[in-house]
């Protein structure tokens, strides 16, 4: 189990690969796509597994959400809207530390994004090289107190992620909303996220149909599990990693999933740097903020 400090994730994973060890890794995966590529190559060369601690991916509630979407009860996904916690970390740190959960969920529901267009500002002005700073916990270069990003997925789906240092409502907006042709779904993140949906796509939903909750037990059923201290999520990830090792399959949140979420984050800075939409996968594997 690797610690939260991202600047040591690469070295620890490479050491684990050298010694034939599987890894349970804190998120985000690492600082740059160069590091992620190197880590994945080392792991796959030895057929080793890496599980990323995106706890919501392992939630038993998620199977009911995915079935709801697969059964067509919400219709076609039109928009995915995510926000960070927007507390003192609002902006760049929020994007890296908490945005990774939202990016992972967007991919889970809509597939891989095709391009990203984003703007990063500080004090209302576009970020420049002089405003790049080192993030806490070794998470690498950061910038901005306000970020807005747009992603194009396949089919009809477009995704949006925003974060800024808000004076009011910090942490209350952290989560994901899915707007579809037949309804709306909202959810938070955790091993037992708060999830609700309504089979009404109007701008004032709930008038034609009631909101319904989804728990680990199913639709409109009371929650029977407990996640005190986030112990449930970590246990589910460890059990899934063991299962992946025994069956030679990939964990629900694999190394490639971790890299893909990081790529969506770094695409924000790459788009800002180039002042243009950028295609994914990114051609530039270095950290875009070091190239401003």
Image (spheres, helix red, strand yellow):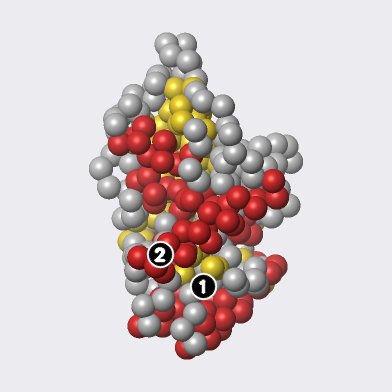
Q: Is residue 1 above or below residue 107?
A: below
Question: Where residue 245 sits in the image (x, y, percent)?
Answer: 41, 69
The label shown at residue 175 is none
**Residue occupying the point 64% across, 41% down:** 226
**Residue that carries the numbered disc 1 in the rendered image:** 23
Query: Does the image show residue 91?
Result: no
Q: Residue furthest left?
A: 155
Q: Mark 2: which secondary structure?
A: helix
Q: Residues within 10 Å of mark 2 (few under 14, many from 20)?
A: some
Q: Is residue 44 above or below residue 279?
A: below
Residue mark closest to the camera, 2 vs 1: 2
Question: Where residue 216 sits in the image (x, y, percent)?
Answer: 51, 37
Question: Where residue 153 sits in the image (x, y, percent)?
Answer: 32, 48
**Residue occupying the point 58% across, 56% down:** 235
The label shown at residue 244 is 2
Q: Is residue 165 above or below residue 51?
A: above
């Amino acid at each position: 189990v690797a610690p939260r400090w991202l600047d040591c994730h690469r070295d620890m994973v490479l050491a684990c690969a050298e010694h034939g060890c599987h890894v349970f890794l804190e998120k985000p995966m690492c600082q740059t796509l160069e590091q992620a590529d190197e880590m994945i190559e080392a792991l796959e060369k030895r057929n080793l597994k890496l599980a990323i601690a995106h706890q919501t991916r392992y939630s038993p509630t998620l199977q009911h959400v995915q079935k709801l979407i697969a059964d067509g009860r919400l219709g076609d996904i039109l928009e995915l809207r995510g926000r960070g916690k927007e507390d003192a970390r609002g902006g760049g740190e929020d994007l890296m530390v908490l945005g990774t959960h939202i990016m992972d969920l967007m991919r889970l529901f809509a597939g891989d994004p095709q391009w990203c267009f984003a703007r990063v500002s500080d004090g209302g002005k576009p970020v420049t090289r002089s405003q790049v700073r080192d993030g806490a916990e070794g998470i690498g270069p950061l910038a901005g107190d306000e970020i807005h990003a747009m992603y194009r997925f396949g089919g009809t789906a477009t995704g949006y992620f925003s974060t800024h240092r808000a004076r009011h409502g910090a942490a209350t907006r952290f989560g994901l909303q899915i707007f579809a042709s037949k309804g709306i779904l909202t959810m938070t993140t955790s091993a037992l996220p708060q999830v609700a949906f309504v089979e009404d796509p109007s701008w004032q939903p709930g008038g034609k149909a009631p909101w319904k909750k989804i728990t680990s037990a199913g639709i409109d059923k009371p929650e029977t599990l407990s996640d005190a201290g986030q112990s449930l999520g970590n246990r589910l990830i460890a059990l899934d990693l063991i299962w992946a090792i025994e069956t030679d399959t990939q964990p629900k949140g694999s190394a490639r999933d971790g890299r893909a979420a990081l790529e969506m984050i770094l695409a924000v800075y790459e788009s800002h740097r180039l002042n243009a939409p950028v295609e994914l996968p990114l051609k530039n594997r270095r950290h875009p903020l070091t190239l401003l």
